[in-house]
Amino acid sequence: MISKYDPFQKKILHHTANACLFPICALHHVAVTTVEGIGNTKSRLHPAQERIAKSHGSQCGFCTPGIVMSMYTLLRNKPKPKMEDIEDAFQGNLCRCTGYRPILEGYRTFAVNGGCCGGKANGSGCCMNEKESMTMMPSSLFDSSKFQPLDPTQEPIFPPELMTQRNKEQKQVCFKGERVMWIQPTTLQELVALKSQYPNAKLVVGNTEVGIEMRLKNMLYPVILAPAWIPEMNAVQHTETGVTFGAACTLSSVEEVLRKAVAELPSYKTEIFQAALEQLRWFAGPQIRNVAALGGNIMTASPISDLNPVLMASGSKLTLISMEGKRTVTMDEKFFTGYRKTIVKPEEVLLSVEIPYSKEGEYFSAFKQAYRREDDIAIVTCGMRVLFQHGTSRVQEVKLSYGGMAPTTILALKTCQENLSWDWNEKLLQDACRLLAGEMDLSPSAPGGMVEFRRTLTLSFFFKFYLTVLQKLSKHQNGPVSVAREGSWGKSELYIITLLLLLSFYSSVDASEAQSVPGFVCFVSAKDVPGSNITGIANDETVFAEDVVTCVGHIIGAVIADTQEHSRRAAKAVKIKYEELKPIVTIQEAIEKQSFIKPIKRIKKGDVKKGFEESDHVLEGEMYIGGQEHFYLETHCTLAVPKGEDGEMELFVSTQNLMKTQVGSLGVPSNRIVVRVKRMGGGFGGKETRNTILTTVVAVAAFKIGRPVRCMLDRDEDMLISGGRHPFLGRYKVGFMKNGKVKSLEVSYYSNGGNSADLSHGVMDRALLHLDNSYNIPNVSSMGFVCKTNLSSNTAFRGFGGPQGMMIAECWMSDLARKCGLPPEEVRKINLYHEGDLTHFNQKLEGFTLRRCWDECLSSSNYHARKKLIEEFNKQNRWKKRGMCIIPTKFGISFTVPFLNQAGALVHVYTDGSVLLTHGGTEMGQGLHTKMIQVASRSLGIPTSKIYISETSTNTVPNTSPTAASVSADINGMAVHNACQTILKRLEPIKQSNPKGSWEDWIKTAYENCISLSATGFYRIPDVGYNFETNEGKPFHYFSYGVACSEVEIDCLTGDHKNVRTDVVMDVGTSLNPAIDIGQIEGAFVQGIGLFTMEELRYSPEGNLYTRGPGMYKIPAFGDIPTEFYVSLLRDCPNSKAIYSSKAVGEPPLFLSASVFYAIKDAIYSAREDSGVTEPFRLDSPATPERIRNACVDTFTKMVTVLS
């Protein structure tokens, strides 16, 4: 939280900001409060900390400090917030673990309309009356009455030293670094003089653009001018023609002023203000809006700016100042002269911006389409204005401004000119759309792609504007609203950095220039590896590239320096000579060139040919499922500490796989390498094998210099280097009867494995083993191909091929239901397995609870009644459609590599009765350590408070299997139980001789009788193993089952969708910890929403990842979870095959989010039917706004297609 005294508003302001962007120089005269400053576990937690913890809103914990500080800042500004305020405060925060529900549920207790319906069931504060507010599970997982109350009087005061500064005259401040000089003038005259002296200097207020350019785009600005203290640039003036804002006014302050104006002025005067507020509402997150300046937004000249189209369409006036004086320019079609260029001269400063009042008879709207509603950059954005001749519906003036359709923000001049003096009716609509379709043209190779989608959006936005204006006109003229329908017409340690290159041969690496960078230590490459440079699961990778670089992100070398900044600079100075090669990037390219990583896997059952002959219908099709970035909040990181003796080294690593992290590249035995993991900031499979890429490089560097070395990858580096979920292409042929019963299936799966084998064959195995999802298919023939491409090797990701395999199954299931003309839920149910059935891999289903889950979900979701309501809604609405789908899942539990199904544990009991527990699993937010403590507590019969887990390490439990495949609680729990039983057996004679003694008494006696109080435990899953050649064996120990029903609403004009409601019923056996298990279900489900509807990886033809970092790659945010989200655990279903009758829960729920995808497809079918299009259509995953909009065929899409 940033706190400062604002001399312009004469009050203390508190606001959140992004620490990674906020410049230290800008903290002069500012107080900074971090999460450590508001409370801690040693003394007292702040209510904002306590409530997120006790409501189970923190899993891995990496995002928690940021979320806590967003909440804390809100409470400092508004001690009694509304639920909407809380949701708005989190727009700039992300969490990858929880699914957000428990965070909102915990913080709802602060809201005046929160708690349990705000204490006013069905009253004005009832959540049931808040249409857009999140409604979720009851708060039975925590007792809010035990939360400590919030007392605003006990918060730290603003530092008095800073208050005393307010009466002192500000003086110009200058900070000089190695390469950058920061100057903060205090008067306008000083600023203008400095800009004259340094015409190329950047003006920085929030650093939200320059900070990214310098950090991520390798740009350097030697002189930075900070105008935040200059009165004229922070002033707000209400004039006769509008409101004038100083160019340094933050977007939050602009928002505040405009909101007040809208409340106080006649509505006809605030049309433009209302449109600007709508754009500001979705402009980045509050952390950005709090510091970013209005002037910065304009001068950045981004072609996808949210505000510039509003300013251009409204004819806002800009005042510029220089040593030569002032001049005023209108923001029109001449203002932007090229990409990121304006008419402003280098020596000029943007002083102020006047946003005009609207006039009577003038209407204004603004629209924006992005991949994610919250905190996302626009795909297309616009501002639209029309002025009518007095008292008529005849157009006097019209302005349509678009962003995202050219290298600059543009006006549709031709369309605007042609529509003058026309009446606002359907003829104008049709002619304007025709003109726009021609004028808003894009080349097929336009930067950003999505050409058809973007062009369609320009028409969709105008149609929305047309309808909005029509409605307002009719209200003013008291006439009926005629809504157009189609028929009438989206520190000691050192630092290290890697070098990245596309597919190529390289002949030389020259690090001589890097040596001149301050703090440079050395350059490390393949020749410095003391052991073997060969690495990877299949020994088909290298620690450092030698001669050939096989993908963008392949590490060639590393620069070691004393700081991260110096290492970055030095890395940029390394020169590489190379010759480019032709890469293979996509699955289609790999198929064409037969580039596969052998072997090709097959599963066959029954007589497929006969099955097709006996079928009433046969359908063929294919579906593509895109990859997914893990986006764990903590990127890959390693600290390597050489011990100086016999090659010993200690590695502190963020890894799921300690055994594979005992690097062989140092040429020493594993007993010299100790790997330690305290906890991870998320993993999701991404740290099962790929962490070794970084760990080995860091270890080699530490070995070379004999000093500790550490590295934590930046997000863009992590995404480029470490790979993600495998993209899949599925081709299927399915035979079925008229009643929807499946008879035969032929399917081929192709996955994009990347440049090495890694775990791709295991992923493909699981995909093939889950090709049935939950359906009994008598005849199956399947093949799985792993494509070798020149992308970073793809790897394990929650679900491990299972979701991709099941997604293809639901694709053909959806198609055949439509072909049969039967309700999809009936077709799915008729094909579900029964107890005792054999799967396509010949494993008998025992304890099959899926049909119970199905029936409970149908009942709890009120499926049939809601389906009728949806049908009625779709009849009443042309441009909004709803859809609903219910999807089952059956997920096999075990590693498909049999020897990995083992675990060890170590239990130490100390003489005071306390227990130190160690096991082979790692904690990454999934609550494994908590569950293991519970297992030990139950086994030993002592409170959990006596048991402690410090870390996971290779010197306590050796040869650990990775924490993966959802089995970690099963196998480690049994190992812990085994160790505890050993100790209890030793204690048995002592307990018998003193049955009324306490635990401490028994331990003291055992110690005095020289009885060992330390024991190892071990467990392996029995009788698992499968042979693909013979289709025999038992690949899974048991199955986890679940069913989800989801309802969505799509905007047919933009492709936006809203997750209205989801009901989940999950069989987790007898839950070890319901709060943890529900958290895993919700977290997996929301991660699946990302996979199937939002997260899209885009590559260049050379294999360079475009969508790097949170700016371009969008994971679900708070606003993307279902508005109503209900999760229930199936009762009375103990599982005899796991510890204390529990079941695995980490991966199985993820696929249930396919219910959202197929609900979207259901809604699209309704939209297409309104356009007279009834044939089946292909919808690939993810169902992005682009895919949804393009699938909703209508007049506008056809218009764009015809003109193309």
Image (cartoon, rainbow, N blue to C red):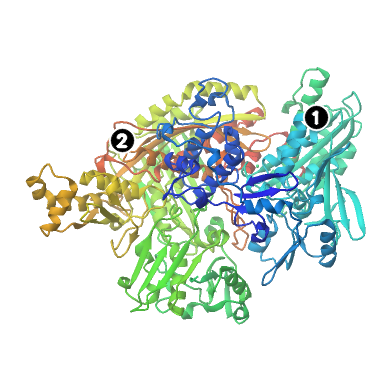
Q: Which residue is mark 2?
A: 848
* Up-down relation of residue 157 to residue 78 (above or below): below
Q: Amino acid at mark 2?
A: Phe
Question: Which residue is rendered at x = 7% and y = 46% of the image?
Answer: 993
Disc 2 vs disc 1: Cβ atoms closer than 8 Å? no
Q: SS class of the residue under badge 2?
A: loop
Q: Is residue 1032 visible?
A: no
Local packing at callout 2 (Cα closer than 10 Å; few below 14, some 14-19, many 20+) is many
Check residue 857 in the rendering and tell me which mark sits there, or answer none.
none
Depth check: 1187 or 1014 in front? 1014
Depth check: 1158 or 314 in front? 314
Q: Is residue 709 visible?
A: yes
Horizontal side, residue 715 vs residue 421: left or right:
left
Question: Which residue is rendered at x = 24% and y = 40% of the image?
Answer: 1136
Residue 1010: % across, % down: 12, 60
Q: Amino acid at mark 1?
A: Leu
Residue 931: % across, % down: 32, 46
Q: SS class of the residue under badge 1?
A: loop
Q: Residue furthest left?
A: 993
Question: Which residue is rendered at x = 78% and y = 18% of the image?
Answer: 480
Q: Which residue is mark 1?
A: 265
